[in-house]
Amino acid sequence: MARYFTRVDHILKNHSGIGVKRFQLVCGRRKLICRLNNWLQIAISSGIEEITLSLPSEYSFPCSLLSGGSGRSLQHLELVNCAFRPMAGLGCSRNLTKLHLHSVLITDDELACFLSECFALKHLDLSYCRELVYLKIPCLLEQLSYLNVDLCHLQMIESKAPNLSSLIYSGNLIELSLGQSSKVKTLDINFYDKTNFLCYVITKLQNIVPNLESLTIYSDDEVQQGGMKHDSVSRDTTTNLRTMPGHKHERLKEVMIIGFCSATSMVELTCHILENTTSLETITLDDVCDVHDLENIRRCCTTTIRKTGSCYPLRREMILEAHRGVMAIERYIRGKVPYNVELTVREPCTWCHDLERLDALEKENGSHYSPPHLKLEDISLLLKPV
């Protein structure tokens, strides 16, 4: 360990002030803490621009190293699993553009004090900061455009940042006050403990974010259906689809339905969108509810860059339902797609969702499927207006 300390000391001293811009340390050993403050002092005094630290929970970040103008060059600060107790007048915060605190101990007052001097801050990311209760964003943060809050024990978020445009929140139901952040255009929100979330969105959210353009909502507990079954267009060749005349959508541009199925109500909704959305450009229907891989939901049989390396596992009934969904698209939907609208259909994987191959594996292993009922909570709907 002594040899390691000596080597790090040598590297930091030899590179001090000659262009080193980033200091990153993932530290799981308590023995390193005794030397960490010294390393930070060398890095900060040399004009470091980015600090990323993942530390043992008992470590308290030495804010004194940032005082007196020492940390004026700092632009990006990311702290993981430690205590951060800033005091007024640090000076380092004036040029800070990005702040990320994950599992960090910091109180409401301490964060408010620190943010009050972060005039250049553009990106604020807070996650698992359990001491935070009331997040207050001052109007002085005129550059702040992105705010992400994930699983903090908050009761309220109040933002007066005038140019905040993107807000992402996951956690318990809280009060949102964005009166002076009326430029929010992108909102991703997930209230884990909230049922009937759609009712909240319809009745409350539109007044909080009047200029919203893109809304993504996650509502796993929206409806408790138990063993409820849904009518399927595949069971009746004479299905008469219901319509809602008079409901036009003039700004909707992109539609993505993840977990498209043959349920009559799902087919009716899709047909309604196609027939009543004059601005629609693209519609994507994915027959597999693979919400864990939204950035690249192409099947592994068609791409070699899929992050998970395999497709989302499905039980037999869901594979069968995915194929029924494909049939429903061909029978009821494809013919209603306007010529200027691009339709993309993502079908089950020809490898991971091949029933013959899965049956052979089951026979070999002596296992079998226990098919579930079709559930509408296995569906995600993403809409983007113009």
Image (cartoon, rainbow, N blue to C red):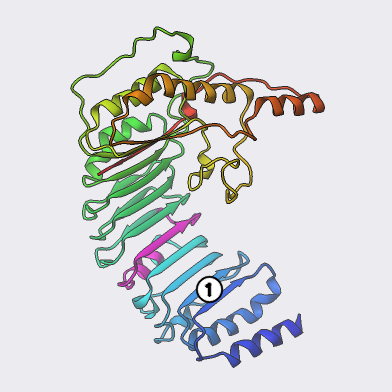
Q: Does 115 appear in magenta?
A: yes
Boundaries of the magenta span? 111-133
What is the x, y in percent for residue 223? 44, 25
The residue at the point 58 percent across, 51 percent down is 305
Which quadrant, please, contains the C terminus?
top left
What is the x, y in percent for residue 255? 35, 37
Give the class, few, some or many, for how many residues have Cα within 10 Å of label 1's Cα (few <14, many ≥20). Answer: some
What is the x, y in percent for residue 220? 47, 33
What is the x, y in percent for residue 45? 49, 88
The residue at the point 25 percent across, 58 percent down is 160
The residue at the point 79 percent across, 23 percent down is 363
Residue 280 occupies which quadrant of the picture?
A: top left
Q: Give the SS element for disc 1.
A: loop
The residue at the point 21 percent across, 45 percent down is 210
Q: Does 337 appear in magenta?
A: no
Compared across the picture, whether 228 is left or right of 200 comes to right
Decide which of 249, 180 is in the foreground and name it.
249
The vertical placement of 150 against 32, above or below, is above
Which quadrant, please, contains the N terminus?
bottom right
Residue 96 occupies which quadrant of the picture?
A: bottom left
Task: Say which residue label 1 marks.
Answer: 61
Compared across the picture, whether 308 is left or right of 289 comes to right
Decide which of 220, 140 is in the foreground and name it.
220
The kind of residue tagged 1 is Phe
Q: Residue extending furthest left?
A: 246
Compared across the picture, whether 315 is left or right of 180 comes to right
Q: Residue extending furthest front?
A: 339
